[in-house]
Image (cartoon, rainbow, N blue to C red):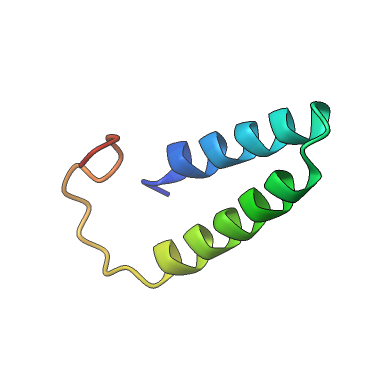
Amino acid sequence: MPHDWMIRVLEDLQTYARLHGLAALAEQLDQARLLALTEIANLPQTGAGLDEPGA
């Protein structure tokens, strides 16, 4: 999946939030991750450099 980097970043942020007692933030980051997965799954498959941040 060309957007794997974004999912990993959200997971890393969620882990940090949980480890530092930021439960509400961790929950919101989980929701953001799920939303990202949903939107990514519905993107048209173009494959033109989409694996780069900022692309």
Quarter containing the C terminus: top left
Q: Is residue 11 left or right of residue 40?
A: right
35 w.r.t. 26: above or below: below
Q: Position of residue 37 (x, y in %)?
A: 52, 60
Q: Position of residue 48 (x, y in %)?
A: 16, 48
48 w.r.t. 16: above or below: below
Which quadrant of the figure has residue 33? bottom right
| Frontmost residue, 28 versus 36 | 28
| Frontmost residue, 3 versus 12 | 12
Q: Residue at 29% of width from left, 35% of height from top?
A: 53
Q: Residue at 56% of width from left, 41% of height from top?
A: 10
Q: Position of residue 23 (x, y in %)?
A: 80, 44
Q: Is residue 46 left or right of residue 24?
A: left
Q: Residue at 48% of width from left, 58% of height from top?
A: 36
| Frontmost residue, 19 versus 34 | 19
Q: Position of residue 5 (x, y in %)?
A: 45, 36
The residue furthest bottom is 42
Q: Residue at 22% of width from left, 52% of height from top?
A: 47
